Each structure stands twice: as C-alpha cells, then as structure tokens.
Image (cartoon, rainbow, N blue to C red):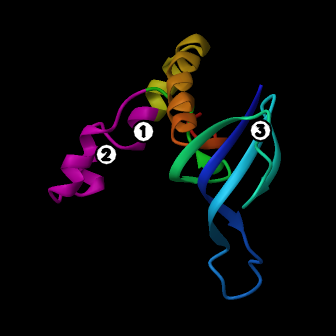
C-alpha cells in the first residue's frame, strides 16, 4: 500500500546546542509511506501511484517518549487530588490511610495477572496520546 500524506505541518528536531527550542515546524510538507514505512519527506514529491490523503494542516510529530512512568500498580489515589486542592496536608492524608503507602500496599497484595490487567489499559492510553516509548519505573514494591 502506497499513501502520500499532503498538507502536513511537520515537527522536526533542530540543533539543540544553540539557543533554539530543539524543534521546528515545517509547513506544506508531504510524507510518502509505502507498506507502513516512511520512504520520503519533502515539500514536493511525485504522487503517481500513491493514494493521496490531505492532513489539512494537521501536525505530524515524532513519537513521544515517557521516560518516567509508574505503569504497574494497583490501587487508586485520584480522590486525594480534591483533598490536596482543598488544602489538606499530605501528612494528614497519609495518616488517614491514603498517600503512596496505600498504593504500595495494594500493589503488594495484587497478583501478576491483576497487575498486568491494570497496566495494559494505561499503556494503551499512552499510545493513543502519541507515546511510542515508555520507561517503566517500579517503585511500588
């Protein structure tokens, strides 16, 4: 299958040794893809034999990297955010059974199948958001 993506905004890396932001956005780009592999990138490419798909100035970026994620854990501390936002000190949350120790204990009680079942949807959510590489931290015992 041969596809040509046209009308792309393309994020590219720059020389990060300068005072730049480390990336650049190029307008009006084309990306040729053959059998799932990018074969050419440019402002003008031959389109014969390609299915052309306009991205209508949508941004194309390299895959994102999450270099610090705790993907494998059990328990849920989302309710603590409201407490923290209302001014409850972390030490009080911890004293009432919350905090990091609550998820550490839940993780230690969970078996491998349960932890895997919890981790897969988290990884899938990261992929839907454009993350292609993750470094998984343990830290939960």
Q: Which residue is mark 1?
A: 101
User: Mark 3 to mark 1: distance in Å?
Assistant: 48 Å
The quarter of the displayed image where residue 35 is located: top right
Query: Any magenta on residue 48?
Result: no
Mark carried by residue 13: none
Q: Residue at x 74, y 78 (%)?
A: 16
- Which of labels 3 and 2 is toward the front? 3
The quarter of the displayed image where residue 1 is located: top right
Q: Position of residue 92 (x, y in %)?
A: 23, 51
Q: Read off the magenta span.
A: 75-103
- Outermost residue, bottom direction? 19
Q: Which residue is mark 3?
A: 33
The tag earlier along the polypeptide, 3 or 1, is: 3
Q: Is residue 134 visible?
A: no
The quarter of the displayed image where residue 90 is located: bottom left
Contact (Cβ within 8 Å) of mark 2 with mark 1: yes
Q: Nearer the viewer, residue 48 or 57?
A: 48
Q: Is residue 109 left or right of residue 113?
A: left
Q: Nearer the viewer, residue 64 or 116?
A: 64
Mark carried by residue 94: 2
User: Mark 2 to mark 1: distance in Å?
Assistant: 8 Å
């Amino acid at each position: 299958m041969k596809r040509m993506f046209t009308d792309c905004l393309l994020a590219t890396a720059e020389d990060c040794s300068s005072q730049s932001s480390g990336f650049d956005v190029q307008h009006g780009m084309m990306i040729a893809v053959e059998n799932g592999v990018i074969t050419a990138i440019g402002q003008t490419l031959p389109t014969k034999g390609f299915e052309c798909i306009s991205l209508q100035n949508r941004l194309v970026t390299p895959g994102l990297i999450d270099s610090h994620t705790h993907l494998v854990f059990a328990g849920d501390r989302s309710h603590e955010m409201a407490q923290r936002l209302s001014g409850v000190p972390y030490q009080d949350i911890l004293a009432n059974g919350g905090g990091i120790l609550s998820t550490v204990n839940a993780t230690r009680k969970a078996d491998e199948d349960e932890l895997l079942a919890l981790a897969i949807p988290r990884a899938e959510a990261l992929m839907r958001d454009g993350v292609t590489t993750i470094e998984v931290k343990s830290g939960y015992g």
